[in-house]
Image (tube, helix red, strand yellow):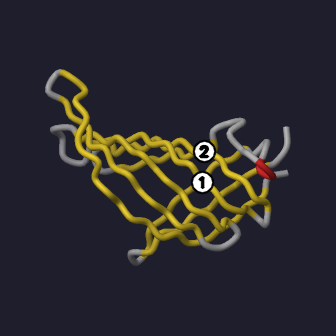
């Protein structure tokens, strides 16, 4: 049965330089350092590649994040994969726990995370299961 936890996180963004994708297309590379509060008491390191198109409001990014700490009191780490598209201003985000990436007491973790920003504060909702 899936469980759901919610909380807040702090985030710091650091530009890491551009990446040449060829054909005159460059991607921005960014590092994000996060501190999660609440039932997910952890730190996260994210590496993101982002691109924009010539059409205003159309862009995308992919990222991989390593989260290390406790989830509902269980210690371990896990990876997430982010995939966000902005289609002429309409956003969609898929943020998934990478299967079999959980370590320690988080071995077997599966799930999805949603991120929200309200009033300049960042919030997460993580729906997850543990076990095979």
N-terminal of the two: label 2 or label 1? 1
Q: Residue at x 67, y 61 (%)?
A: 69
Q: Nearer the viewer, residue 103 or 7?
A: 103
Looking at the image, residue 16 lies above or below residue 24: below
Q: Mark 2 near mark 1, Cβ–Cβ under 8 Å?
A: yes
On the image, the x and y values in percent for residue 127 come to: 70, 55
Residue tagged 2: 79
Q: Quadrant of the C terminus?
A: top right
| Residue 115 located left or right of residue 75 | left
Q: What secondary structure is marked by label 1?
A: strand
Q: Residues within 10 Å of mark 1 (few under 14, many from 20)?
A: many
Q: Residue at x 58, y 45 (%)?
A: 80
| Residue 86 located left or right of residue 19 | right
- Distance between the Cα atoms at labels 2 and 1? 6 Å
On the image, the x and y values in percent for residue 7 come to: 61, 71
Q: How many marks?
A: 2
Q: What secondary structure is marked by label 2?
A: strand
Looking at the image, residue 116 lies above or below residue 90: below
| Occupied quadrant, residue 85 | top left
Q: Which mark is residue 67?
A: 1
On the image, the x and y values in percent for residue 41 come to: 65, 68
């Amino acid at each position: 049965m899936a469980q759901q936890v919610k909380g807040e996180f702090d985030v710091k963004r650091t530009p890491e330089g551009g990446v040449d994708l060829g054909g005159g297309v460059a991607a921005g590379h960014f590092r994000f350092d996060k501190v999660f509060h609440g039932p997910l008491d952890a730190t996260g390191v994210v590496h993101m590649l982002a691109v924009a198109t010539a059409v205003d409001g159309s862009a995308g990014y992919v990222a991989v994040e390593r989260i290390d700490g406790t989830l509902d009191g269980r210690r371990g780490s896990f990876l997430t994969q982010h995939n966000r598209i902005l289609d002429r201003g309409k956003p969609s985000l898929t943020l998934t726990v990478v299967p079999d990436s959980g370590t320690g007491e988080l071995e077997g973790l599966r799930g999805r995370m949603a991120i929200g920003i309200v009033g300049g504060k960042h919030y997460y909702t993580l729906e997850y299961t543990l076990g095979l």
